[in-house]
Amino acid sequence: MQSTIIMIIIAYLFGSVCSAIIICKIMRLPDPRSTGSHNPGTTNVLRIGGKLPAGLTLLFDVLKGLLPVLIAKYIGVLHQALAWVALAAVLGHLLPVFFKFKGGKGVATMLGVLLGLSWQLALMVIGTWLIVAAIFRFSSLAAIVATLLTPAYAFWFADKSFVIPLTLLAVIIVLRHYENIKRLLAGTEGRIGKKNKT
């Protein structure tokens, strides 16, 4: 129990390291919270600085979700508690203690924790994202659909103990996409491959 609590705290702190802000500062780019969509995430960094900083942001956002789960496994945290460690890592990304609790939308970090929990589960979520994105050409819609299906995938194909924390995770991430949902309903959301002013 003690190791689980410690790992939840560590996972939250890992998640709180905002890759987008740090990478933009190192590469002398504008703060992603003050330009573009004002979201410290991969898509906005791509808009601000191009493929290299965006790729680095994506990589580190995935790693800060993956590493805490792998560490928790290594030190023997109970299997049924791993998804709570995963949830803590994503919450750190969404509400980073080091950056005034203003973080990104959590999709890349969610992918990282899923890779740590079950690579099969992660592949199903990635596949869902790719299919929805290919059909509808909306990155946000693909993320929302893939996220919402994650608890169901966990129930049927991974581990039922993951379902409750992953359901909470899905609800939180979808709520963070509130503005995207409004634009999707209004028909103003930017499509993949086209510049989006928001």
Image (cartoon, rainbow, N blue to C red):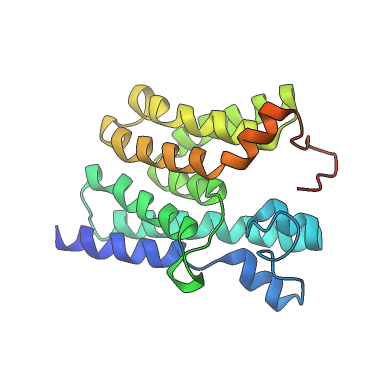
**How many numbered discs sit on the rendered protein?**
0
| Residue 180 seen from this side | yes
What residue lies at 53% left-to-right and 60% top-to-bottom?
Answer: 103
Q: Nearer the viewer, residue 197 or 140?
A: 197
Q: Position of residue 57 (x, y in %)?
A: 64, 60
- Would residue 6 appear left or right of 197 to someone viewing this image? left
Name the quadrant containing residue 183: top right
What residue lies at 70% left-to-right and 66% top-to-bottom?
Answer: 34
| Residue 133 seen from this side | no
- Looking at this view, name the residue that lies furthest to the left: 1
What residue lies at 36% left-to-right and 55% top-to-bottom?
Answer: 88
- Would residue 55 appear left or right of 96 to someone viewing this image? right
What residue lies at 52% left-to-right and 45% top-to-bottom?
Answer: 176
Is the residue 25 above or below the residue 173 in the image? below
Q: Position of residue 129 (x, y in %)?
A: 61, 31
Is the residue 2 above or below the residue 134 in the image? below
Q: Nearer the viewer, residue 109 or 148?
A: 148
Name the quadrant containing residue 135: top right
**On the rendered image, what quadrant is the N terminus found in?**
bottom left
Q: Position of residue 51 (x, y in %)?
A: 79, 57
